Image (cartoon, helix red, strand yellow):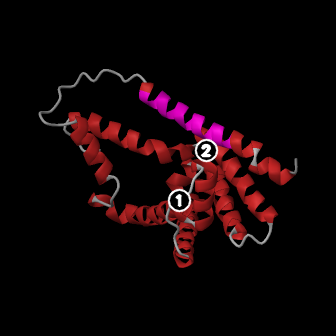
Amino acid sequence: MSVIEFIEGPLWSFALAVFVLGIAWRIFSLLAMKRPRDLSVAREGAGGVGGATKALVIHSIPHGGNLGRTIYHFVTGYMFHIGLFVLVLFAAPHVAFIQERLIGADIGWPEMPRWAFIVAAEAAFAGLILLYVHRLTDPVKKQLTDIDDHLGVWLTFIVMLTGCLALQEAHAGLRAFHMLTVEALMIYFPFSRLMHAFTFAFARARTGATYGRRGFTP
């Protein structure tokens, strides 16, 4: 078995298993976590689904008196996350891989044109770099940043960069190197703060329901 065959075969299967099982375990642990009893008197018509929904909506858009301080984070954050989401699901090589390796059949998954790939890639790269620069220069975020944050950023950046290098499919080694970086990210993902991609909605909803019960908007 060659190195490329190992990367695209057993190592891919291992990384996928760690990714899926790790995420499932983290979400199950979050949902099974015991909650302390809230002894406060619930405000009439507050909390529950309404408070959770309100928190999810409000914290997904710039709002309130902190607009000037948060607009940079919102714009760059959406540039990166939407750009990366579009690339992962609709870039032509990814569509082919998803249908062949994950679904096992051609289901007509839409592919975005090359110009859309370029736009999405530029938005994702710009958003990631601007977010990282802000994290390194903001006094508060700089103090809160640790090795986990740096590893997450650099692994994501390297995956995106190797993906662009492998786009032309000029050499099988470039494709394998990109896949190797993806597998490293998949293995690291469930044990890092990158898990916020799956847990942020649970956290916001719980916070909104808890504070909404007391008549506050978090």
Residue ID at (33%, 63%): 67
Rendered view: 1 above or below 27: below
Residue 58 x, y percent position in the rendering: 29, 53
Instruction: Pick the residue in front: 166 or 97.
Output: 97
Q: Please name whichever residue, 194 or 39, is drawn nearer the observer in this view of the structure.
A: 194
Task: Pick whichever of labels 1 and 2 is earlier in the sequence.
Answer: 1
Q: Residue at x 67, y 59 (%)?
A: 159
Tell me residue 20's x, y (percent).
58, 39
| Position of residue 40 in the picture relative to residue 198 (left or right) | left
Q: CA distance from mark 1 to mark 2?
A: 18 Å
Helix, strand, or loop for circle 2? helix
Instruction: Characterize the magenta stretch by its predominant secondary structure.
Output: helix
Q: Position of residue 25 (x, y in %)?
A: 54, 31
Residue on which the image places disc 2:
189
Label 1 vs label 2, nearer the camera: 1
**Mark 1 neighbour density, 10 Å: few (under 14) some (14–19) many (20 or more):** some
| Vertical placement of residue 63 versus 186, above or below | below
Q: Is residue 209 left or right of residue 197?
A: left
Residue 42, located in which quarter of the rendered image? top left
Placement of 191 over or under 181, stated as above or below: above
Specify the label residue 89 is tagged with: 1
Mark 2 is on which residue type? Phe
Q: Secondary structure at mark 1?
A: helix
Task: Give the magenta range.
Answer: 15-31
Disc 1 marks a residue whose amino acid type is Leu
Based on the picture, tell me whether residue 27 belongs to the magenta stretch: yes
